[in-house]
Amino acid sequence: MSVLTEHAVVQDIIVLAKPALFNIYFALASIPIGFPLAMLLALGKNSRSAFIAYPARLYIYAFRGSPLFIQFFMVYSIMLAFNISHWKPMGIDHVVLHPLFLGPLVLILNTAAYAAEIFAGAMKAVPKSQIEAAHAVGMSRWQTFRSVIWPNTLRLAWPAYTNEMVFLFHATAIVYFTLPVINEQKDLMNKAGELFERDYNVFLHFSVAGLYFLVISIAIFALCGVVQRRLNRHLALASNDGANAIKPIKFNPGYLR
Amino acid sequence: MIEATSSLVLQWFGEDAAFWFDYLTNGKHMAWYASVRFTLFAAVFGAICAVVFGLLGAAARRSGFVPLALIGRVYITMIRGIPDVLFFLFFPLAFEQAVEFFMARQHCPEALATVTGWPPCDAAQWFLTTTDYLLLASVSLGIVYGSFAANVIHGAMDAVPESQLEAARAYGFSERAVFWRFRVRQMWVYALPGLSNVWMLLLKATSFLSLLQIADIVLWAERLGAPNYIARVGLVHPDWRWKYYLVLFLFFILMTYLSEQLFNRLQARASRGMALNN
């Protein structure tokens, strides 16, 4: 047993386990808030009113068109600029300027834009005939959205959104390149860099950090695959009866991210 | 020339404008503007590397030789599991150490055998210049985004109409000639939208250059925006970093917009006479 734990790779895996939790935290804190925000932005982008559509488009374009690295620096420095005038008097400066708050904040702003682009595209791909059918049976606008547009959007966008979630998880790697590191609150890249500076073994430490990212990415893909099957469970049944199989509607965005 | 323009600004727009003009054209700001060359070089050279690696990766993926196809498959899927910034930092460091390993083998093989720290001896230390780091960073970007490009190119190769390739075979072209002269020649127009997306990602990733100690636009923005105190003058300006980062934010959006326009033109030009939407 001790032979195993003394092995350099195993030791690295043990040392990097806690830092991995920080990456997981950043992703888990961002996705549940980023998701509804992205849906709202997607609705805004496809809105018929120019007053709603234009700002939503602008926001999505700006946050998709600029590096997350810069967004981190920008939001952090803006928050710092408000510190003396706002956060300090309100007594919330130690919360608002904390990386565990700022990290998810910027990631939410970023992922909302990317996911909104996906959802807006998927929303447009929902077959018109289904919406017309909903109107024909007398559904209200809200009912149509609730029971026709939204489930279909989610179903169509899910593979692309899975990718987005994995990319978001990867993006957590740059949080601590831009925000202050407090004591032992270090993420994978940070800790791997620290270990590297100790013995200059770039292959070992970065590979183990990469392994953590790889394993968690695969876990996200697997988990999302289960959700995907659940979302499409009625289609799987329908496609069993050969000639009458329903042709699945598809949404293939021409971009990776 | 800056002095002449400065006096013109003073004449036409008054003292305030002249002050701001002088401020925005002082030595540090000129260095900031000049450092855009690093970003642009890394983007362009990185993109060239990415297309080359992408082409090789896609070719390997389609190879009939199983180990090569496996390498291609791993290369294409690796980026799905590992963050780009990890590769971006890993490759230059690993390359540097590999070079130093060979230097140590030449200069001090005895120190290499009992190695405790790195580099094993002073003679085996490779001091990288900014240019070296820039080249390494570009190749690094090329490897990471070559993986994306390989995925795009692999898909585009499938989109080439099979009948064209059959026609080529019927004329007696070898399999290799069919691949390079027909499949690769014809796939660009299908790959262009995907490659445009890869270019945007790569352009955004050039903001990481400062992580390799290259004095690029991000590092200069940090330096220029930090609270500026000169004993003789007092506080020149408080913390203005957010203003400089805001400029960078807008700069990258502008670059994205310009690239988008360029790729739209390119797509229109490349698809002349092609029936793409059938």
Image (cartoon, rainbow, N blue to C red):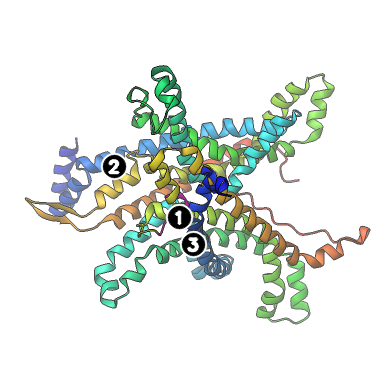
Chain identity of mark 1: A
- The quarter holding residue A125 reads bottom right
- Is there a contact, CB below 8 Å, between mark 3 and mark 1? yes
The x and y percentages for residue A219 are 64, 56
Q: Which residue is mark 1?
A: A187
Q: Nearer the viewer, mark 1 or mark 2?
A: 1
Kindly state the secondary structure of the residue where label 2 is placed. helix
The x and y percentages for residue A254 are 63, 49
- The quarter holding residue A138 reads bottom right
Closer-to-camera residue (B232/B44): B232
Residue at image point 24% right, 53% down = B226
- Is there a contact, CB below 8 Å, between mark 1 and mark 2? no
Q: Is residue A200 left or right of residue B264?
A: left
Asked if one can make out residue B253 in the rendered structure from this viewpoint, the answer is: no
The x and y percentages for residue B101 are 45, 25
Kindly state the secondary structure of the residue where label 1 is placed. loop
Count the numbered circles shown.
3
The x and y percentages for residue A240 are 89, 61
The span from disc 2 to disc 3 (Cα, nearest Å) is 33 Å
For marks 3 and 1, the one nearer the N-term is: 3
Residue at image point 42% right, 30% down = B115
Chain identity of mark 2: B
The three-letter code of the residue at mark 2 reads Trp
Closer-to-camera residue (B130/B174): B130
Which stretch appears magenta? Answer: A185-190
Closer-to-camera residue (B12/B203): B203
Q: Which mark is residue A26?
A: 3
Kindly state the secondary structure of the residue where label 3 is placed. helix
Q: Which mark is residue B32?
A: 2
